[in-house]
Image (cartoon, rainbow, N blue to C red):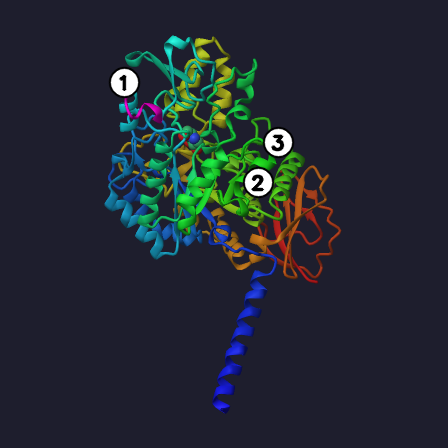
Amino acid sequence: MNKVFFALTCLVLIAVLSCQNKKTVTINQPDRKWWKEAVVYQIYPRSFKDANGDGIGDLKGIISKLDYIKSLGVTAVWLNPIYSSPNDDNGYDVSDYRNIMTDFGTMADFDELLKGLHARDIKLVMDLVVNHSSDEHDWFKQSRSSRTSPYREYYHWWNAERGTPPPRYSLFDVNHDAWRYDLLTKAYYLHYFSRKQPDLNWENPKVRKEVFDIMKFWCDKGIDGFRLDAFGFAAKDTTWPVYPKGYEKDFSKYYALQPHLHDYLKEMNQEVLSKYDVMSVAEGTGNTNEDAHNMVDADRHELGMAYPFEGVDIAKPEGYSVLHFKQVFSKWDNVFADKGWLSVFLANHDQSRLVSRYGNDKPAFRELSSKMLTTFILTMRGTPYYYNGDELGMTNAGFTDIKDYRDKATLTEYQHQINIKGDMKLFMKTTEFACRDNSRTPFQWDGTANSGFSTGNPWIKVNQNYTTINAAAQESDPNSILNYFRKAVKLRHDNLVLVYGKYTLLDSENPDTYAYTRELDGKKILVLLNFRDHAAAAKTGIDLSKAKLLISNYNQPSSDGSLKPYEASVFELQN
Ligand code: NOJ
């Protein structure tokens, strides 16, 4: 009897203890998820590491750098598209969704990569490009072959006898015309991006089934998530209304989040996402906060995470307002304060370099401002995304000759400007600052030829500053940007408050500094950031005398809120 009583008491005790334990970690965090706690590292495969010397990064190259990736402390990798593709838009034009691009390797390489990542506790998120396919995909070849093809309705066609279709803006077309006439069947097909990227018809249930099957194929292989490329554009108003004059200046407003999108996402969730432990994030958030919220409200069973563009669109060649920056990030935090989840990022493969856009890439401030931006990204609520090379403070290459550019959007726009006799000087100046090729130059591994990226001739020029800015040089320097990034990632992993904690903006009207607190379960962290190349004071009213410094990009950080140029200091506050 005593034994039974003892055993029962033990069981009750264990239950109580485990509940308490759970309570301390789950309080105010109703649904913890691995992808909320992840730090995502985005790899642009074409430019990361070339293993076979053809000048193009590949999967074997990534495999050879797995220990480096692990050493960063990141817990998920997002890979830009690696599927078979004729590469009109660097893989965002897929010709076979179940195969690997020859430039990148084989399916066996992919399996090895996935295994290698998982062996290091790193998840793999794949890019899913299904607003459009390549015109070289078998579906499109069939669709284009005849008006009666069973694949005809896989895409959007407008038969020529109906006259010219109502104008639609294309991002990557030399005439900005999203309708392309196809002589064979005397009809126009729709392409919001390039002519080689025809838009799929999501109204067709067969298309949806094809896509869900593709997603299952990759999930069954064991991948951990999807980033849905341009998916906000997938649903279209197929009554094809004529948009008002000038609509193209704000085309997203007309293209994004058309009514059926939520239905498609719900179906995708039901058919695929709900069946696997995968993360899901769609590029762009639609037109309103409500749109964004609805996409990722867990109760609606659509996607897991929003990826709003507003923050990444702030930087301009002439600079940006810190007040505006704070307003935007505070607004987005607020949208998801109670429900839903967002991504936090300032760079990706479609933007130029983080430090050149949001920081200061002059030698005196490159390191400080890179570290400051890293501190920002890793201390906000939401899942942080970090783009490869930014952990070294890689800068814009700023090519001045159009021949050095490879980007589809830039090359077609260049031709467009010539055709309309545009201001070519202005075009080149804007391109130098903003072109996405700036972030696609080869990863700077070391100071050897081609920055250690390739023994061949790189597909795009290496940034000439690789002899000083490279991973090898930063490895051995404890104060390097790279090592600061590692520390900041660790800080986030060690402090759940940085993931889930409530965000409060302080000193909101300060035009130079950004100060905020994060709070969870009695723990309070203060983040002080100076976005300027001169000293500035953050007036938070918080007494720092008893605060514990957690990280700073200065050896002698602020002790009273007066911040040195680009200072970033993070404190734990005592209650
Ligand atoms: C968004 C991707 O991020 C970009 O790189 C691509 O060019 C377009 N979608 C078209 O797929």
Residue 156: quarter of image = top left
Residue 457 located within the stretch drawn in magenta: no
**Label 3: which residue?**
320
Please name the residue shown 33% across and 27% down the image. Answer: 134
Give the amino acid at mark 3: Tyr
Answer with left or right where residue 177 lies relative to residue 298: left
State the image coordinates of residue 367 (x, y, percent, origin top left). Answer: 52, 43
Magenta residues, dominant SS class: loop
| For marks 2 and 1 on the same chain, the one whose residue lies earlier in the sequence | 1
Task: Confirm whether residue 287 shows in the render.
Answer: yes
Q: Amino acid at mark 2?
A: His
| Pointer 1 local density, CA inside 10 Å: few below 14, some 14–19, many at least 20 | some
Q: How far across and down, in percent of the image, does residue 187 sit? A: 35, 14
Q: Is residue 118 above or below residue 57?
A: below
**C-alpha distance separating marks 3 and 2:** 27 Å
Of the two numbered discs 3 and 1 in the rendering, the one whose residue sits closer to the viewer? 1
Q: Is residue 394 visible?
A: no
Q: Which residues are magenta?
A: 146-154
Q: Which residue is mark 1?
A: 146
Q: Report which residue position mark 2 lands on.
A: 293
The reply, left or right, for residue 575 in relation to residue 88 is: right
The disc labelled 1 sits on which kind of residue? Ser
Q: Secondary structure at mark 2?
A: helix
Distance from Cα at disc 2 to Cα at disc 1: 41 Å
